[in-house]
Amino acid sequence: MLYSFQLCFVCGGSGASITCQESGCERSFHLPCATRGRCVTQYFEQYRAFCSRHRPQQAVLRDPEPDTDCLLCLEDVGDRQSYRTMVCPVCQHAWFHRDCIQGHALQAGTSAFRCLLCRDKDQFQQEMLRMGIRIPRRPPEWETAQEFAALMERHSQCDAQHCLCPGGRGQAEEEGPWQLLLCSSCAAEGTHRCCSQLEDSTAQWEC
């Protein structure tokens, strides 16, 4: 069957390119309609997809306790398991909204994505993948951001063998003898004008 003629069971539009993997089921849907239609798309191995009737279910022994909050947004998760709520398969006490845990997974990546309560990683990730949570294979975004910030940080001290500045190597003025010039080649070394005997007219310096 051509994708252009397949109708999405969620929105009714044509061009539904995803068909439920359950044997005998012909329900198709658009990827953007998956969440609204309570479908599950698995982002690992065979990348299988299931409609709302045949999606995988969590083997949860209990429903959430009254007034249980999502550990990420701290809003109530309701009084029973549903498509929009998920629980850690190991401790079965950590509850999350599907949208919240998906957002956390995208930020944490495979190296840091784990249960926020019991800290299990392997079983937690396997279950979240099975339930349709996409976990990118990369370090967490916060580590990447820190590394990038460090790379972008401007060198800010005098590296002359004998720094003469009364305020120390870290003092940097906009002009005058204690103006800090960075190496024009590497920008990883700096000097006060006075410490390297540079004239006021000198605009560049190399270490």
Image (tube, helix red, strand yellow):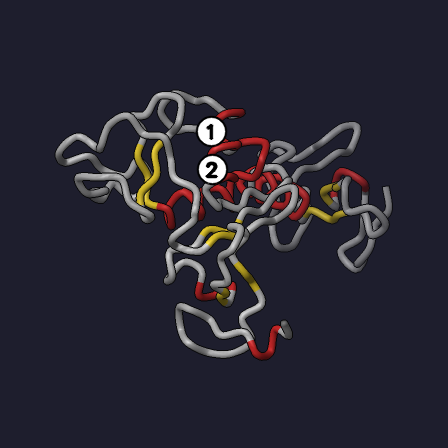
Question: Residue drawn 22% across and 32% down?
Answer: 63
Q: Nearer the viewer, residue 178 or 82?
A: 82
In the rendered structure, which amino acid carries the disc numbered 2?
Met
Choose top left, top right, bottom left or bottom right for residue 192.
Answer: top right
> On the picture, is 163 further left or further right than 173?
right
Q: Nearer the viewer, residue 78 or 25?
A: 25
Q: How many marks?
A: 2
In percent of width and height, residue 183 lies at: 81, 47
In percent of width and height, residue 169 lies at: 65, 33
Question: Residue drawn 54% across and 74% down?
Answer: 6
**Quick check: 3 above or below 56?**
below
> On the picture, is 78 further left or further right than 134?
left
Q: Residues within 10 Å of mark 2 (few under 14, many from 20)?
A: many
- Which residue, given by chain and number where applicable, does mark 2 sit on? 128
> On the picture, is 6 further left or further right than 156?
left
> On the picture, is 147 further left or further right than 85?
right
- Which residue, given by chain and number where applicable, does mark 1 sit on? 124
Q: Nearer the viewer, residue 10 or 163?
A: 10
The quarter of the rendered structure image containing the N terminus is bottom right
Between the C-alphas of marks 1 and 2, the distance is 6 Å
> CB of mark 1 within 8 Å of CB of mark 2?
yes
In percent of width and height, residue 99 lies at: 38, 50
